[in-house]
Image (tube, rainbow, N blue to C red):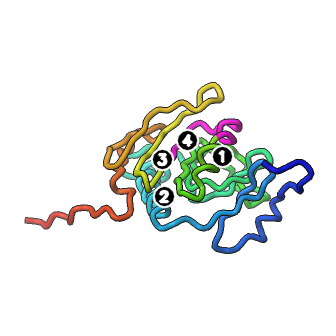
Amino acid sequence: MSQPGTKRATYEDLFGIPENATGEIIDGELIVTPRPSRKHQFASSALGNMVGPSYQFGRGGGPGGWIILDEPEIALGENILVPDLAGWRRERFPGEEATNWISVVPDWVCEVLSPGTIRTDKVRKTGIYAEHGVRHLWLLDPLARTLDVFELESGRWVVLGMHLENDRVRAHPFTEVEIELELLWLGYEPPPPHEPA
């Protein structure tokens, strides 16, 4: 939290951060973190590739009806947050805005945890997401190989499930997709494809 008497960060301050970093404004403080590691990026991309086809595009018999974005800038009050993944039901997503950030609260957010961001992601950002009414929150940890799933009830996060390693998960709000957690961890070697007989 910014100290009394210190200048509160503004959106313009984000233009001064290095290209290889991510900037967020949390409670008036400019938070700059290095770009994610390859394990972090792999987990985030793999998860988006599992959920997106069914829920964004309606492929494989999925319901469609969602917009899912990687690392969007989202304005929640005076905060500018950049979750690893965020999703909106299509009817709630603003097609155009005068700003680069998205001003509509997402329906779902996923934060991929890393040693440099874990405190901010698990404590500061989850509180802001709850305060502004994000309905679903996932915390994915590629080092611990875990996925924790939460739903907002009466302004508080309720744990719906804690999953690890190679669990197969159907989690709200994307219960029509089975997520094979082992496919999210960089270093996992899937079995070779079957050769036709």
Which residue is rendered at x = 59% and y = 67% of the image?
A: 35
**Which mark lies nearer to you, 3 or 2?**
2
From the viewer's perspective, is 6 left or right of 73? right
> Label 4 is placed on what type of residue?
Leu
Q: Position of residue 120 (x, y in %)?
A: 64, 50
> Label 2 is placed on what type of residue?
Ser
Q: Position of residue 110 (x, y in %)?
A: 54, 49
**Which mark lies nearer to you, 4 or 3?**
4
Residues packed near mark 2 inside 10 Å, few (<14), some (14 to 19) or many (20 plus)? many
**Which mark lies nearer to you, 1 or 3?**
1
Quadrant in the picture for the C terminus: bottom left
The circle drawn on residue 64 is 3
Give whichever of discs 3 and 2 has the lower sequence position: 2
Distance CA(mark 1)–CA(mark 3):
28 Å
Q: Position of residue 19 (x, y in %)?
A: 67, 74
Give whichever of discs 1 and 4 has the lower sequence position: 1
Bounds of the magenta span? 127-140
Which residue is rendered at x = 12% and y = 66% of the image?
A: 196
Q: Name above or below for residue 136 compared with residue 86.
A: above
Give whichever of discs 2 and 4 has the lower sequence position: 2
Residue behind mark 1: 125
Element type where label 1 sits in the image: helix
> Label 3 is placed on what type of residue?
Gly
Front residue of 150 and 50 = 150
Distance CA(mark 4)–CA(mark 3):
19 Å
Q: Name above or below for residue 9 compared with residue 122.
A: below
Residue behind mark 4: 137
Distance CA(mark 2)–CA(mark 1):
17 Å
